[in-house]
Amino acid sequence: MDFRKLPSGAVTLRDVRVPGCLLGDKAAFVKRDIHLRDGQISDTPGEAVDMGGAIVLPCFVDMHTHLDKGHIWPRAANPDGTFMGALTTVRADSSANWSAEDVRRRMDFSLRCAFAHGTRAIRTHIDSIAPQDEISWPVFREMREEWAGRIDLQGACLIACDRMEPEGRFRETADRVADAGGVLGMVTYPVPDLRARVEGFLRLAMERGLEADFHVDETLDPESQTLRVVAETARDLSFDKPITVGHLCSLSAQETGVAMDTIDLVAEVGLNVVSLPMCNLYLQNRHNHRTPRKRGITLVHEMKVRGINVSFASDNTRDPFYAYGDMDMIEVMREATRIGHLDHTGDDWVNAFTANPAKACGFAAPSFAAGASADLVICKARSWGEFFARPQADRIVVRGGKQIDRTLPEYSELDDLVGVP
């Protein structure tokens, strides 16, 4: 239940705290009043409500998700919790079950969760190995239209680099992505002709004026250095659209000099980086009956000090790649802070869940200026210590100036779909 009921109409949120970095201020928080009127932030006061020092954040941007995979766990559990277990299980489930209706219902369920938790924009990867692209992309376009005004949706195709043939069937997929206004996406890992495949992939994107989004080095094998191939190829081609690279787990296992040299190249080329700490912690360094010793998180601190645009995101939700999650970006913030030691390193990491992913994906930047849309998440916590100590389950979400109903969908809605008796 929300910790406070706001009145309808014009409202002044008195005594709230906004992270200073979101206002161009060096302070951890700035105390202020926020006026809401006609769906926007306003200069004109309304009915005053004492908020008792509550933290106010802009609604979140979740820039790396897999809405098409979400919530299949009950019928397709990972047999051993490993990456290969996830890969083979998802392939089998998609072949057997991913009809348009199946994908649509699971996507909608995840979007309702994200909306209730306070997310305003999402980029989702869409498995696009033919003929699944012919099923899932039309569904995505339907969902984007249906959710317009609540959650802005972007789609990025997803295909393994050894399945991507620049002169083959993937050209049709690239055309489908372009027609949908999407992003061209691919998974990279060491294959003998990787550079040629990355070049072919980026040329397809350039021909269509598309951005690119890569899953890169999702492994703790230090010899996996495909990030460097992506960066060098983009530089050599003078690729002029935004490129996002996600995961980058192997950097954390590489010798320091090698990793720093690659990060310097990422900064030079201007790649956007997204870290997926919950999924990587779940999959990486997993062996039965052995305690994991490595976290799998990429080198976010080293990237940040080099001026790289670093974000965090949900990744998978209740599927073989991650058994848990609820499309809740506050959960991502709390876990990323603990896993990546984001505390004690500045007060501006909140950008990595709001402004940074918006910039990477081209979504509207968050703003507290008069005239900006009043899309807010308000937490009873008064400091970062209080914020991270509890899950903020009683948060208030305001969309277009109105407090929304945050009731989450029941898992039982999907029982017939995922085989729960």
Image (cartoon, rainbow, N blue to C red):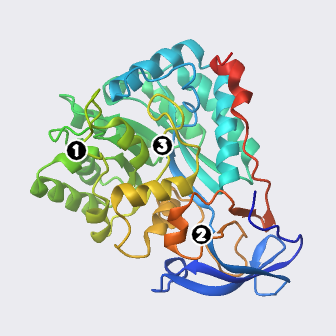
Look at 49% across and 44% down and name the residue there: 183
Does residue 17 appear left or right of residue 303 in this picture? right
Q: Nearer the viewer, residue 321 or 285?
A: 285
Does residue 201 appear left or right of residue 408 in this picture? left
The amino acid on which the numbered mark 2 sits, given as a three-letter code, is Pro
Residue bearing mark 3: 315
Q: Position of residue 319 (x, y in %)?
A: 51, 30
Residue 366 disc label: 2
**Does residue 377 sit above or below 16 in this rendering?**
above
Look at 44% across and 23% down and name the residue there: 78
- Of labels 2 and 3, earlier in sequence is 3
Q: Quadrant of residue 60?
A: bottom right
Whole-angstrom CA distance, mark 2 to mark 1, is: 33 Å
Label 2 element class: loop
Q: Quadrant of the C terminus?
A: top right
Residue bearing mark 1: 229
The nearer-to-camera label among 2 and 3 is: 3
The amino acid on which the numbered mark 3 sits, given as a three-letter code, is Asp
The nearer-to-camera label among 2 and 1 is: 2
Q: Position of residue 37 (x, y in %)?
A: 82, 77
Label 3 element class: loop
Q: Residues within 10 Å of mark 1 (few under 14, many from 20)?
A: some
Q: Is residue 387 visible?
A: yes
Q: Is residue 101 visible?
A: no
- Of labels 3 and 1, earlier in sequence is 1
The nearer-to-camera label among 3 and 1 is: 3
Q: Position of residue 188 (x, y in %)?
A: 30, 36
Q: Quadrant of residue 109?
A: top right
Q: Quadrant of residue 378?
A: bottom right
Whole-angstrom CA distance, mark 2 to mark 3, is: 22 Å
Residue 167 disc label: none
Label 1 element class: helix
